[in-house]
Amino acid sequence: MCAASVSNTLGIEVSLVQNSPCCPHGPTLLFERFNGKRKKQRYYACSACRDRKDCSFYQLADEKVSEAKLTSREELNRSQQPWTSHEHFFQRMQDTKDLSPSERKFCQSCSLLLRPQEVQTHSKHKIKADLTDAILGQPSHLLLPLEDNKTNAQYLFSKTATEFLISTIKRLGYDRVLCVGSPRLHEMIQSEASSDLSSLLLDIDHRYGQFYPPSLFCRYNMFNDHFLDGAKSRTICEDFLHRNHGNGIVMVTDPPFGGRVEILAEVIQRMMGRWTMGLQDLGSTAKLPLIWIFPYFLEQRILDSFPSFTMLDYKVDYDNHPLFQSNKKKARKKGSPVRVFTNLQPSEIHLPLDEGYRFCKACKRYVAEENLHCTQCNSCTSKDGSTYKHCKDCQRCVKPGYVHCTVCQRCELPDHQCNRQSMGCHICGSLTHKRKECTDQSRTAKRYGLFFLRSRPRFSAISRNKRYHLLD
Ligand code: SAH
Ligand code: ZN
Ligand code: ZN
Ligand code: ZN
Ligand code: ZN
């Protein structure tokens, strides 16, 4: 029954099961963990919110829930939805467009396009005025990125990264993009008047609903494949997938990095299955073209789920990435840790030569400047943005700074403790160390705040804007 399941060092396993109870974010995930007395605890909790205070749903797996409680839960779930109807919320955009730019107002404190009669009540808030059509077409610039109270901001692509994605998609001949958790990509496609591309945004952040009608934005949870506005919204996505018998579409997703890869992979498989249903030849083995943007140090986790995928060297830059806020010098040298994973032909994805990328004939793909081809590995082996060097004892390339240890019989940092027992690492998949000791994690993940024990994204759109529930 468990379609996808994953565990971490705390021994918590998570899976996407059928018929799990629903929280306001749709079907919950089943968590299993051993408590102090080594007794197994199984419970359902929210798939989308990392923090209990954003979604407090909790139900023991064997709990019998009374009818009365089920009814009140349903009511609660309904009352937690951000709008009475998407169409109604989107009316704000239409009303705003009817005003002259100088009369148009957006409240950043409340993430809301304001009607003239509402302006007064927001007078102490942060207001953006003089909203031209162009500005209204860039909601990801108007909305403040949702921040997790503990860790990081919503990461928005830099202009360069967005343009790279769009030019790649166009060059490969696609005519439409399913943007899952990539609002800025959607926005740029939508704002290109001359664009031959169309797009549909799937995202859990309801704030986009006032900028886009239901035909351009579905509120969707990518940790349980749930369309939060029900069957009508799901049909919009299906029609988009099935247009032209499924030809010409590519899906681009940039999930929260704290999300559990196996759950995301399972959900992506479901989306792929949805696409397949629209193919002319239902026996076809074709796969939905996918671009999955994720940190390089989670490569193994992605390959476990999608063995045929390739990680490209392209470093995805963000406007508000902590990379450029802390630890600047060290970070800049290696560049962003975020890469592109794809089932497309790597040789066909041309990485920009003017940014130092080059084509490696032997590897048949574009590689980063510092990624030198190793004749012994017969591959361009660098992953993290530094130049790896070959160790003849390990018979593979290792990160700079590592030296071969004859006791451990592998390359280690010079100050490592020899012969430590280990159950393997849940970050990079290596059997040589534990999660806690993962250099990928401690040096990189920690630096980016990617320290997640549960599959929770960095924020909850709902709770942040609770005040305006059903006020649309
Ligand atoms: N780089 C992208 C944004 C990535 S940030 C861009 O510039 O377009 C991650 C995105 O995933 C955010 O838009 C966030 O709202 C969305 N998200 C977070 N949790 C989600 C969930 N459970 N389901 C769907 N989308 C989610
Ligand atoms: Zn929830
Ligand atoms: Zn306000
Ligand atoms: Zn090598
Ligand atoms: Zn070695």
Image (spheres, helix red, strand yellow):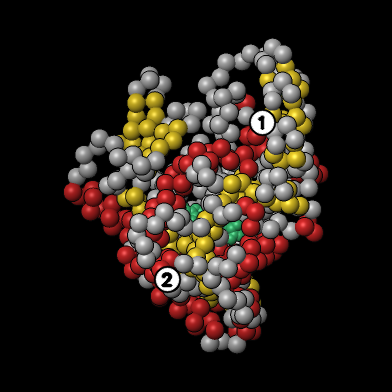
Nearer-N-terminus badge (1/2): 2
Confirm or deny contact between disc 1 and disc 2 (CB under 8 A).
no
Q: Which residue sits furthest front?
A: 362
Does dot 1 land on a helix, a strand or a loop? Answer: helix
Amino acid type at image mark 1 = Thr
Amino acid type at image mark 2 = Arg
Q: Is mark 1 within 8 Å of ligand 5?
A: no
Question: Can residue 64 be seen in this snapshot?
Answer: yes
Question: Which x, y percent locates residue 389?
Answer: 77, 32
Question: Which x, y percent locates residue 472?
Answer: 43, 72
**In the depicted view, which residue is nearer to us: 40 or 171?**
171
Question: Which x, y percent locates residue 323?
Answer: 71, 47
Instruction: Judge the density around disc 2: few (<14), some (14-19), many (≥20) Cα neighbours within 10 Å.
Output: some
Question: Which residue is disc 1 drawn over?
Answer: 439
> What's the mark number on residue 243?
2
Does dot 2 land on a helix, a strand or a loop? Answer: helix
**In the depicted view, which residue is nearer to us: 306 or 98?**
306
